Image (cartoon, grey):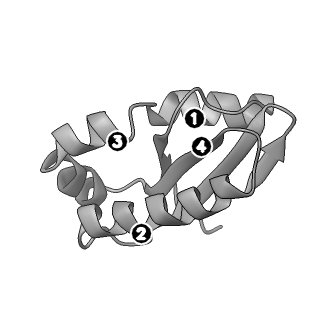
Amino acid sequence: MLSSEAGVVHIEIERSLVDLQAQLRSAQLKRQAMAHSESRPVRLVIAVPETATARQRLATVADLVERALPVRSRQVWRDLRAGTVPAGDGILFVRAPTRG
């Protein structure tokens, strides 16, 4: 969870996308519970690995992703780096750390 005067960002980390509908619903329920005790907006960000498999699984439910998580990963990254709350819920692709 990240928070500022403008709002709260609840980041749900999903290491594997098995059933996005169920995973999304669970995250939305957590966000709703958090929102009951907050006066500021609570945004939901689903963080997933930046892999071909994750992108393929998301593509199979593209309509759901567009409706439920309309803010794209690039914009979520921009907002988080700037310390601002995204304008809506979104998806966040996260690269695995490089081994060196």
Bin the neighbour count of mark 4 within 10 Å (Cα to Cα): few under 14, some 14-19, many 20 and up: many
Residue 95, percent from left and from top: 52, 54
Q: CA distance from mark 3 to mark 2?
A: 13 Å
Bin the neighbour count of mark 1 within 10 Å (Cα to Cα): few under 14, some 14-19, many 20 and up: many
First-in-chain label (3 vs 1):
3
Position of 84 with respect to 33 (left or right) is right
Is residue 19 placed above or below 65 in the rendered structure?
below
Q: Amino acid at mark 2?
A: Ser
Q: Amino acid at mark 1?
A: Val
Q: CA distance from mark 1 to mark 2?
A: 21 Å
Bin the neighbour count of mark 3 within 10 Å (Cα to Cα): few under 14, some 14-19, many 20 and up: some
Determine which of the numbered discs, if any, sits on residue 26 in the image.
2
Determine which of the numbered discs, if any, sits on residue 68 in the image.
3
Q: Amino acid at mark 4?
A: Arg
Is residue 2 placed above or below 16 in the rendered structure?
above
Q: CA distance from mark 3 to mark 4?
A: 11 Å
Is residue 40 placed above or below 16 in the rendered structure?
above
First-in-chain label (3 vs 2):
2
Position of 89 with respect to 23 (left or right) is right
Q: Which residue is mark 1?
A: 76
Residue plotted at (58% across, 26% down): 87
The image quarter containing residue 76 is top right
Bin the neighbour count of mark 2 within 10 Å (Cα to Cα): few under 14, some 14-19, many 20 and up: few
First-in-chain label (2 vs 4):
2
